[in-house]
Image (tube, rainbow, N blue to C red):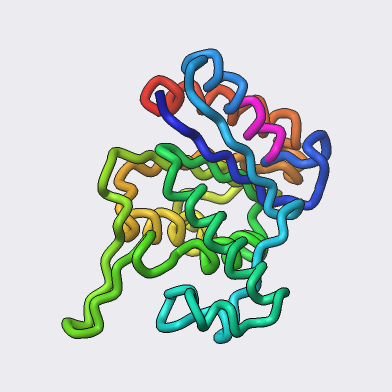
Amino acid sequence: MSTLLYITVNSKPEHLSTSKTVGRVFIDKYKECHPDDTIEELDLYETDIPLMNYKLFSSRAALVCGEDLDALSEEDQQLVHKASDLCDQFIKADKYVIAAPMWSVFFPSMLKQYLDCIILDGKVINIDPAHDKVEGLLDNKKRKMLYIQSSGANVPIVLATKMNHGVHYLKDIFKFLGVRKFDRLLVEGVNDHKIGKEEAIKRAIVDMGDILPYF
C-alpha cells in the first residue's frame, strides 16, 4: 500500500478548472488501479500555507523549537506548527500528483510558497554548513511525482524549454530532494481555437494512459 498526496493549485472550483478536472480523472483512474492505496488531498487555495519569515527559523531552513518557539507570539507558533505538519504530510507520501495551470510561464505563487514551507532542514533536506553541502533526504524510499499542467496555448516542442519553466523547475527540485521518477501531463491548447478546452482534456486523458500503468 502506498500513500498518494494530490495537490491542487487553482482558486477555481473543480468544474471550472482544467487542471483540476484532468487531475480528478487521473485520481479516479488511479483509485481503480490501486484500491488499497491511501489518497490525501491538499488544495493550496483552501489551506493556510504559512508565509515563511525569519522569526520562524532557528537557522537556515530549520524551524525554531523549545524555548525559542515558546518565545514567539501565539500566531507565529501556529505558523511553525502548521509548517511542520505540512512537511510531515509531504514526507509521509510515496507518490505526488500536482495539478496547476501555467501562469506567466511558471505556476501560481501559492505552489512556490508551499515548497518553501515544507523544504525543511533535517526533514526534507540536510544542510551541512561545515562542508558547505545540501542534500535531499527523500531518497529513503521509492517515490514518484506527476505534474499536471494546463495552459491556454499549445506550446511547440521547440519552445517547450523556454516556456515550460514550471515543469522544469519541479523536475529539478524533486530530483534534488530525492524523487527520481518524474512524469508530466500537459493539457495544452485550452484557449486555442483549433483545440479548445474539451479537446485538450480529451487528449490529456488519452496521454495519461501511458502514465497510469507505471505510477
* Quadrant housing residue 81: bottom right
Question: 21 or 125: nearer the eye?
Answer: 125
* Quadrant housing residue 161: bottom left
Q: Is residue 24 left or right of residue 148?
A: right
Range of residues picked out in magenta:
20-25
Q: Is residue 153 magenta?
A: no
Q: Position of residue 99 (x, y in %)?
A: 61, 44
Q: Is residue 86 above or below residue 63?
A: above
Residue at 64% from the left image edge and 25% from the top image edge: 25
Question: 198 or 184: nearer the eye?
Answer: 184
Q: Is residue 21 magenta?
A: yes
Q: Is residue 215 above or below residue 6?
A: above
Residue 106 visible (yes or no) = no
Residue at 82% from the left image edge and 41% from the top image edge: 13
Q: Position of residue 17 (x, y in %)?
A: 76, 41
Q: Position of residue 43 (x, y in %)?
A: 69, 47
Residue 60 visible (yes or no) = yes
Residue at 34% from the left image edge and 48% from the top image edge: 179
Q: Is residue 124 above or below residue 209?
A: below
Q: Is residue 60 above or below residue 26?
A: below
Q: Quadrant of the C terminus?
A: top left
Residue at 40% from the left image edge and 54% from the top image edge: 171
Question: 168 or 144: nearer the eye?
Answer: 144
Q: Position of residue 125 (x, y in %)?
A: 34, 64
